[in-house]
Amino acid sequence: RSRLQRPPAAARAGPAADVKVWIETPAVTLAPGGTTKVSVRIERAKGFTGRVPVEIRNLPPGVRIPDIGLNGVLINEGETSRAFELVAEDWAAPVTQPIFAVARVETRSPTAAAYSSDPMTLLIRSSSGH
């Protein structure tokens, strides 16, 4: 079981963000045809209490998040984390790639407020590695 991790210092530097976001697992290995659960966690600030849609970006070809809603991975009001499943299709090619969680603060402002996590390393191993 992964330990609860605080956001990295780089994410805490600078002006206070409405939301800090991080992926709890720094690295995940998947075989083609495999699945794994990953959790994304947020910390709200500056009195923000709303829901937070989180988009998982930079997934390699053949890797997807099934059962995702229109808003992506959604962390509702009163929640601080959400687990989601990563699935590697049978044809997913071997690759080591960083992926990111990007949290959006829903607002009526024309300027979008989005905050990125540090990268999580996703390794798709060779199908011969079963």
Image: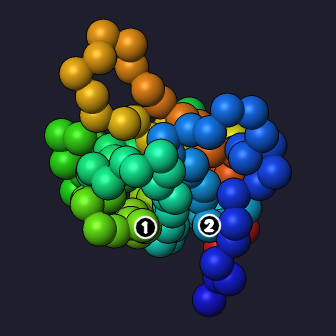
Label number found at residue 129: none
List x then y, in percent, for residue 31: 60, 63
Instruction: Identify the residue at horizontal 47%, vertical 46% (top origin).
Output: 46
Task: Tell me the residue that label 1 is attached to.
Answer: 81
Which quadrant would residue 124 be assigned to in this image? bottom right
Q: Is residue 30 left or right of residue 55?
A: right
Q: Nearer the viewer, mark 2 or mark 1?
A: 1
Q: CA distance from mark 2 to mark 1?
A: 9 Å
- Vertical arrangement, residue 60 with respect to residue 1, above or below: above
Q: Are marks 2 and 1 in contact (CB under 8 Å)?
A: yes
- Vertical arrangement, residue 12 with respect to residue 108, above or below: below
Label number found at residue 24: 2
At label 1, the amino acid type is: Ser
Toward the top, the furthest residue is 110
Q: Quarter of the image for the N terminus: give it.
A: bottom right
Instruction: Identify the residue at horizontal 52%, vertical 58% (top origin).
Output: 43
| Disc on the earlier residue, 2 or 1 | 2
In the foreground, 66 or 102: 102
List x then y, in percent, for residue 125: 70, 57
Instruction: Identify the residue at horizontal 71%, vertical 44% (top origin).
Output: 11
In the foreground, 73 or 91: 73
List x then y, in percent, for residue 25: 66, 67
At label 2, the amino acid type is: Glu
Q: Answer whether residue 27 is visible to the viewer in this image.
A: no
Toward the bottom, the furthest residue is 1
Q: Is residue 18 left or right of residue 112?
A: right
List x then y, in percent, for residue 9: 81, 51
Please count the marks in the image.
2
